[in-house]
């Protein structure tokens, strides 16, 4: 973390999705950059999804596969003509296979400034429990 | 005199094999870069953040994807025909005991200056940051706006 403080951000082209399943709708699909970390209680997923509005994002957890899927409308107005185009906009799509059992009812998602914070609480059984060994 | 002559030596001079290699390497790069990248991406300056610039009759629109940035953290200034954007992205330290599985999001500082095709009205520039998308609307200066010219018939 210490060396990250004064680091200059590098321009990165958005990674396009290469999935075997082809989309039926035309348009580009990108992979959002994510941070995933785990504590005793929960797994947190942070995903950079600029331009996504809360209503356009679908989060689905089915048979331990977490799917993030969102539609993004192009921000440009109809009368605007390109001068420079360095990045493209399109949908975001990414899937993760979770190895832990998640308490589906307690999943909490928050989208703020284009960053998704998804909390996936583990079910009680999956949490590590300290077992006291009694001496007779 | 000798020094100036030496640099002007033709291709068989002592320094030239490397210069020639360098020239070839640059040409190859140009060729392969042009093939692998699309036409649109070819104009990218490769500086963070990547920007899209569009225009209509009255304004220029500069857009950049800056997820997680707050409007107050961005430093935007305009002079004549150039727009400069600077800022820093800080990722808050999460739970100390958290165990990371993926870490793809990056933090750091950035600054970028772009030159617009024409002068803008600096007093009326408007910047907005919503859903991680920065939009700067720059009204064109009166002199830079297209003017309709009617052809008179005599």
Image: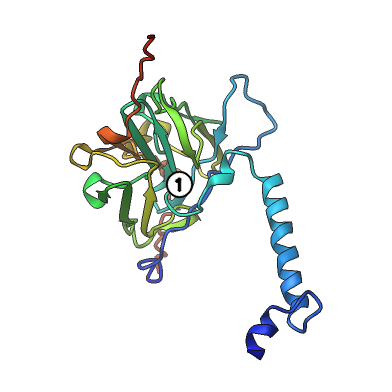
Q: Quadrant of residue B94?
A: bottom left
List x then y, in percent, for residue B1. Answer: 63, 89
* Residue B140 visible (yes or no): no
Q: Chain of mark 1?
A: B
Residue at image coords 42%, 65%: A133
Q: Residues within 10 Å of mark 1 (few under 14, many from 20)?
A: many
**What residue lies at 77% left-to-right and 75% top-to-bottom?**
B10
Q: In the shown orientation, is residue A105 left or right of residue B71? A: right
Residue A113, percent across and down? Answer: 31, 40
The image position of residue B98, as x and y in percent, is 40, 58
In the image, is residue A80 above or below residue B94? above
Residue at image mark 1: B50
The residue drawn where x is 43% and y is 53% is B48
Residue visible at 50% across and 42% down in the picture? A86
In-image side of A93 versus A59 (left or right): right
Frontmost residue, A131 versus B21: B21
């Amino acid at each position: 973390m210490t060396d990250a403080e004064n680091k200059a951000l590098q321009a990165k082209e958005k990674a396009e999705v290469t999935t075997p399943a082809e989309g039926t709708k035309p348009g580009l699909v990108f992979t959002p950059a994510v941070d995933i970390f785990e504590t005793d209680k929960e797994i947190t997923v942070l995903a950079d999804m600029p331009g996504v509005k809360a209503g356009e994002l679908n989060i689905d957890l089915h048979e331990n596969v977490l799917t993030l899927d969102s539609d993004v409308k192009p921000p440009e107005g109809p009368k605007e003509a390109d001068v420079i185009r360095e990045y493209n906009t399109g949908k975001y799509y990414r899937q993760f296979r979770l190895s832990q059992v998640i308490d589906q009812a307690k999943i909490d998602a928050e989208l703020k400034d284009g960053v998704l914070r998804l909390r996936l609480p583990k079910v009680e059984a999956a949490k590590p429990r300290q077992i006291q060994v009694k001496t007779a | 005199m000798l020094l100036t002559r030496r640099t002007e030596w033709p291709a068989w001079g002592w320094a030239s094999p490397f210069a020639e290699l360098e020239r070839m390497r640059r040409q190859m790069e140009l060729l392969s870069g042009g093939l692998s990248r699309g036409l649109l991406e070819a104009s990218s300056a490769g500086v963070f953040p990547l920007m899209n610039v569009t225009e209509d009759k009255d304004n220029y629109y500069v857009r950049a994807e800056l997820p997680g940035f707050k409007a107050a953290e961005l430093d935007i200034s305009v002079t004549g025909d150039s727009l400069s954007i600077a800022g820093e992205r800080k990722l808050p330290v999460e739970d100390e005991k958290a165990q990371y599985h993926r870490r793809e999001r990056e933090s750091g500082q950035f600054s970028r200056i772009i030159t617009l095709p024409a002068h803008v009205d600096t007093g009326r520039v408007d910047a907005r940051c919503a859903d991680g998308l920065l939009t700067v609307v720059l009204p064109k200066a009166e002199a830079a706006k297209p003017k309709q010219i009617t052809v008179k018939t005599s």
